[in-house]
Image (cartoon, rainbow, N blue to C red):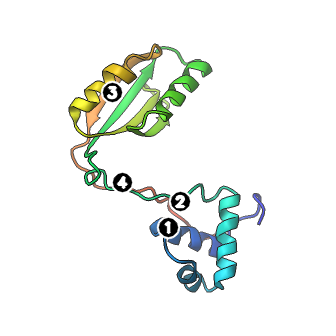
Amino acid sequence: MTRDRKLDEVDLKIMQILQQNGRMETVHIATKVCRSPRATLDRIEQLAELGFIERFAAILNRKLVGRPTLIVTLVKLKSHSAEQLKAFATTMQFQPEVQVVLHLSGEYDYLLHVSLRDPAEYEDFLEQKLCNLPMVDKVHSSVVLKEYKMDAAIPIYPAV
């Protein structure tokens, strides 16, 4: 399988299965895609090597691990130089409470998902980490009251 080769139905089905249950045993995946366990494992390894599968991870329940507060934060920078944009993104990537960093078009430059124990911890994050950055111009925060869907799975469509 080369990077320029189109994914086939088996590849797509394997990725769909793994998104739902990354711990499913290869033998069970093989049964679902009508391939041998060895051929299925080879496909999974190739998909990972080529970057289609970036990593395997457990999705934790924020509430049960003591971080029930989710804040969506919009950040506007003072300047839009490549250096400042990269510096901000890099800084946020190293903040453990920041789960998501998205560079946006429009009025705000970045959207962050910040997971914390409580609003007081967010106040500390704002004062000590975010608003202290010299490139930050404006911050808008919204507390997430209820999650209806928080899914990391990407829709997989049939091969063309």
Element type where label 4 sits in the image: loop
> Is residue 84 visible to the viewer in this orientation of the structure?
yes
Residue 160 position by quadrant: bottom right
Q: Secondary structure at mark 3?
A: helix
- Is 116 drawn above or below residue 41 in the view shown? above
- Residue 160: in sight, yes or no? no
Give left or right: position of 149 versus 6: left
Q: Earlier in the sequence, mark 4 or mark 1?
A: 1
Q: Amino acid type of disc 2?
A: Phe
Q: CA distance from mark 2 to mark 4?
A: 17 Å
Task: Give the amino acid at mark 3.
Answer: Phe
- Give the quarter of the image for residue 124: top left
Looking at the image, is mark 3 or mark 2 earlier in the sequence? Answer: 2
**Mark 1: amino acid:** Gly
- Reading the image, the residue beneath label 3 is 125
CA–CA distance in space, label 3 to label 4: 23 Å
